[in-house]
Image (cartoon, helix red, strand yellow):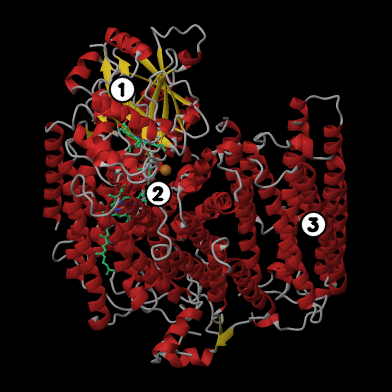
Amino acid sequence: MANNHNSANPKVDLTYRRKKNAEDMKHQIITFSMMIFLTIIAFIAVGYDGIGEWFKIPFIITLAVIQVIFQLYYFMHMSHRGHEAAALFLFSGVGVAGLTVLAFMTIIWW
Amino acid sequence: MSTLTQKKGIGATIWDYLTTVDHKKIAILYLISGGFFFLVGGLEAMLIRIQLAVPDNDFVSAGLYNEILTMHGTTMIFLAAMPLLFALMNAVVPLQIGARDVAFPFLNSLGFWLFFFGGIFLNLSWFLDGAPDAGWTSYASLALHSPGHGVDFYLLGLQVSGIGTLIAGINFLVTIINMRAPGMTYMRMPLFTWTTFVASALILFAFPALTVGLALLMFDRLFDTAFFNPALGGNTVIWEHLFWIFGHPEVYILILPAFGIFSDILPVFARKRLFGYSSMVFATVLIGFLGFMVWAHHMFTTGLGPIANAIFAVATMAIAVPTGIKIFNWLFTIWGGSIRFTSPMIWSVAFIPTFVMGGVTGVMLAAAAADYQYHDTYFVVAHFHYVIVGGVVFSLFAGAIYWWPTMFGKMLNEKLNIVTFILFFIGFHLTFFIQHFLGLMGMPRRVFTFLPGQGLNVGNAISTVGAFLMAAATIILLYNIVLTAIKGKKVGMDPWGDGRTLEWAIPSPPPEYNFKQTPLVRGLDALWIEKMEGNKEMTPAEPLGDIHMPNGSILPFIMSFGLFVVSFGLMYREDYSWGLAAIFVGFIITLAAMFLRSIIDDHGYHIHKEDLMNEDKGGKA
Amino acid sequence: MANVEEKLTAENFPASPERATLEGKNKFTGFWLFLGGETVLFASLFATFLALRESTAGGASTQDLFEIPLVFVATMLLLTSSLTSVYAMYHMKNFNFGKMQLWLIITVLLGFAFLLLEIYEFNHYVHEFEFTITSSALGSAFYTLVGTHGLHVAFGLLWITTLIVRNAKRGLSLYNAPKYYLASLYWHFIDVVWVFIFTVVYLMGMVG
Amino acid sequence: MRKWLTKWRLFSLFAMLTLVLAGCGEPFLSTLKPAGEVADMQYDLMVLSTLIMVVVIAVVTVIFIYVIVKFRRREGEENNIPVQVEGNHKLEIIWTVIPILLLIVLTVPVVSATFKLAEVDAIDDENRKPEDAIVVNVRANLYWWEFEYPDYGVVTSQDLIVPTDERVYFNLIASDVKHSFWIPSAGGKMDTNTENVNQMWLTFDSERADQAGEYFYGKCAELCGPSHGLMDFKVKAITRDEFDQWISDMETAEAVASTDLAVQGEQLFEEKGCIACHAISPTDERPAAARTAPNLATFGERARVAGILDHNAENVRNWLKDPETYKPGNKMTNTYDTLSDEELDALTEYLMGLKVSSN
Ligand code: HEA
Ligand code: HEA
Ligand code: CUA
Ligand SMILES: [Cu+2]
């Protein structure tokens, strides 16, 4: 069924791919530093007494969401080809998840 | 490798089924166990109806009634309706998309055995500590209050079988995403495949909520946590939400495949393609999508407040629109057709008005302010039996008869089928139509008896009579099955004559590899297209070659058995000294089987080209 | 697949080895779907926690319990382990089995450290604050949510370790490449969940 | 086959009509005999939605019958291949839009009624006067109901007494497991949760209350254990004047045993420990958690014994002798020593004499 060999000329293919992988890896490291950075900001925001709760909570949640998008798209390669089904189902899951959390935060109040 | 034709000893056959990973055999396993549980659930329904035949009856005691009622609902939904649908899905979906098997044959078997052991575990409660008695919804306050181990059986049994269901759902999804034959685009898939796809997606997103709910309730009961204990800040409404976040999609998990079955049968016997194919697909997806936003319509009286109630009321009603689209598409499918009233077709057409009656009462229930009156009355009971029996059970009858040749290579007796239909259809309406009025007249559901002098006697008596007709119908069906097994004639390819989809393009029952050569699909109703062009069979998409087959394995059985043991251990942890040991032993059994599975390489085997050629006329190269 | 058994070299090793065979592709798709389901599972636990986060029944509250340093260290450990598993996959794509194994071992060690820290933390709460899974609804929700994540970590460690040991002698193939890849996806997913745990449970819990 | 189908449809329509004509249930129990503003509102919604649904069913059925009659395969048509129609946009739009319109017709009154039925602000209004807006605290227990009138410090159980022609507000809670408070003819229904107070209101129309007879029936509508089906209560709707009178009787009531046998019963009531659970004064001031059994102050005037048995000495006796037979799983069984026949007689006499009404 599926054919495993990608190109007629494996040698050229190899050097090209190596280079591409290395470049990818560079992005990954940048992503990682961003994630660490966001995490530190979130922790600082919470530790710092000057700002109110109304700001802190939405702020750290936004940071978390950004960080998770990094994880999904870079670490888990969701931006790559062949991830259509993956994305569809993951985001459907996120949709149900969001609805659940929203409901539990709004209509269970007592 | 033509094992099918070989005669085998009974031991070998049993071993074969215990270890099989073949979707067609797993389908049969699902059919047998689902059918068995349907009889059990039906028997429980009969006990319910006998008890309620007359006021102040003491045929069963109050406590026992609650057990029967709970087990009836739970068994029917989780152990009968869903597995029976899985039976048809397993038997048909891989064939309909031109695949040799499902994506994960091993997991397919695991899913079945988990369901099976979960179901057995749940039903063993009858013989051990008494069955669960808090209703199939097992609302937390009552479930925590319920003495004995009944509710624990419910929690653990459903947990185990729920994992099996989740696995089955993922398996179908991947099968449909990755294993379609060349040319089988999404918009050429038969509707049964489509609805299986969407229902499986619903399983994927709904069952985790149930898993969590069951786990929390189990922790509360077995480990004294405080999720639902108001004294420690717990909140039972959380259970209601979790249950219904699962529970509402669940009813669409049941009805969507049923819709798919009818959508496949109607065109065949009307000899006309499905009207509005793309809007059918669209409606299916939309129903699935909306299905996640309406769960609180089961909680209108919980006190969520008017804003929540209004939102959920409107969202719920919206589902009538895509469902209506389907209804009218079906009507216009047979409009202008050439209808042959075979028994699958009779079930299918009878479904249309019946389901509409059930659906519209659903919309009435969705009217929040009016639901304050309907809720927890027999009006609701009537509603959901109209949609479940009139929709799902009708579809199971229709589908089972229709695909009986695919599964067993024989046709059920048509005359008897029709007798079954008549009895069941009359019995069904007799039983449940009157229940609308009982509900409106003030009869709450889940009551073990009612008092005379409240105007409820006649209705209940009629309802009971109807149930007996359904039982008679079921018994005739059983007789028919036995008769067919003994005397039925073998059939060949396309036994209904007007088959349109790929399962009819191969022999019935199909060989273990399904398609000797993967077919090339050129449009919707692939076989019909070929027929219309005068071709006898599908054009192959590949040359004849070796076919890769997965090996059978006993490990799924062992893994599931391990969890079965764990369940006993968890439950009896504090009652018996062996309880703790059972937890460990069970886990070790399961983990060891998982470990073996992951370290033993299983590359499967091949059926060689030469053997395929020898089998009969041989394929085209 | 006939060519699974073929001798593999860096040259003929495919660009996406995890999806090169039909089995691999199925596993890949199936696993992502599974993660979609896991999302809902964790969402239900998160939602329950959020609904019960003030139900202390007079016992310790989140503000009493949580401390920034501990959570911060745990977070760093887990985030870093995510990066190391990315490294492992990088080497897999380059058909460098040895380095892949090495980075995975580092991942496991980091994950293990995280787990130890969590055990210490739970132990601390139980003994210092008498905050247990049965002491209040908050306790039940907290331990169940964070504990479920912890169990995922533990299972992930077991899984990756098994892979490392099982394949140590025979090297990378198209048969085990998908397995490695899925394990790393799983590991990232655990990290994703943790990001929400440290934000929603710990940081929000400290804010009040 | 087909002929038979149409016949069946006719039959069911007919059956439906007969049922409707036969009067739908009893006026004291049926939602189809509404007896107050709330029930009216809900009944109107029921009628409106039923009408819409009947239209939908009719349309589908007409098309359905036409199709299966007209397009059945006749003899000689075995090789007929009908035109393979793909679809029809116009038709599809029609059957998308018309249901949407029908639903809008339904949604508007539903939403407005939903909000109207949630108008319970009066309960917590600081300026509320009990004369205009009476509040009843309903506490549901396995398997009995307690009704507390917080404005008057009066407690009763099993029989709910309400004034007619005005809004009666309810605070609802359960003390053990979830129950649901439902008076079908007056309107329904609200769950009594274990963790929070739910609120609702009802009205009872004086004229229709008279037609219904002495009482409306109330039911528990949430599975709560073996005797869920027996967790009935009665609602007595009386005029405002009568109600005020009743309240003042309750406020001043004192249990007096009049006959010798009753005095004996009174003693037994203490000796046997009944008093530990059952209060006999309507002004029971213990906290709710201590009130573990129905208040018996008005027992002699009840409509039923334990909510279900006809109210007579024989049944009281039976109940005391063996409550389990009548209400399986109830919380009174086995909480006191077996009673001899004489003791039963005395207790019965005493209990039947517990009355508050001045007339
Ligand atoms: C297969 C199962 C199934 C299906 C398909 C449905 C379908 C629907 N259900 Fe049902 N339902 C159940 C199974 C099912 N239900 C069960 C088991 C319960 C009880 C659970 C328990 O408490 O134990 C329940 C309970 C239930 C309730 C809660 C009642 C209560 O407890 O108070 C509600 C309330 O909104 C509801 C609504 C609906 C609606 C709006 C639909 C819609 O999907 C129906 C849509 C279909 C149509 C409307 C007909 C066709 C449409 C047309 C011909 C177009 C024109 C129509 C209009 C304009 C109206 N259902
Ligand atoms: C798939 C779902 C499904 C199906 C098919 C059915 C089928 C039937 N149901 Fe049930 N039902 C539920 C799901 C289902 N039900 C649920 C979810 C509840 C709610 C539970 C709860 O409140 O918690 C419920 C509740 C329920 C009630 C309400 C009980 C109450 O509230 O107190 C009643 C009462 O009439 C009833 C009746 C019936 C009847 C007569 C059938 C009939 O159609 C059954 C027909 C089948 C048979 C009659 C089989 C005959 C079997 C034999 C003849 C045995 C032969 C034996 C051997 C050979 C071993 N059901
Ligand atoms: Cu109380 Cu049912
Ligand atoms: Cu629903």
Residue D179 placement (x, y as % from top left): 41, 36
Q: CA distance from mark 1 to mark 2?
A: 35 Å
| Residue B135, numbered circle | 2
Residue B568 placement (x, y as % from top left): 53, 65
SS class, disc 1: loop
The chain containing the residue under callout 1 comes to D
Kind of residue sitting beneath label 2: Gly
Q: Residue at x 72, y 39 (%)?
A: C200
| Residue D298, numbered circle | 1
Q: Can the viewer see residue B173? A: no
Q: Dot 3 corresponds to which residue?
A: C115
The chain containing the residue under callout 2 comes to B
Kind of residue sitting beneath label 1: Thr
Q: Is mark 2 within 8 Å of ligand 2?
A: yes
Residue D196 placement (x, y as % from top left): 52, 30
Of tags 3 and 1, which is closer to the observer?
1
Label 2 neighbourhood size at 10 Å, few (<14), some (14-19), many (20+)? many
Which is more toward the observer, B611 or C145? C145
Label 3 neighbourhood size at 10 Å, few (<14), some (14-19), many (20+)? many
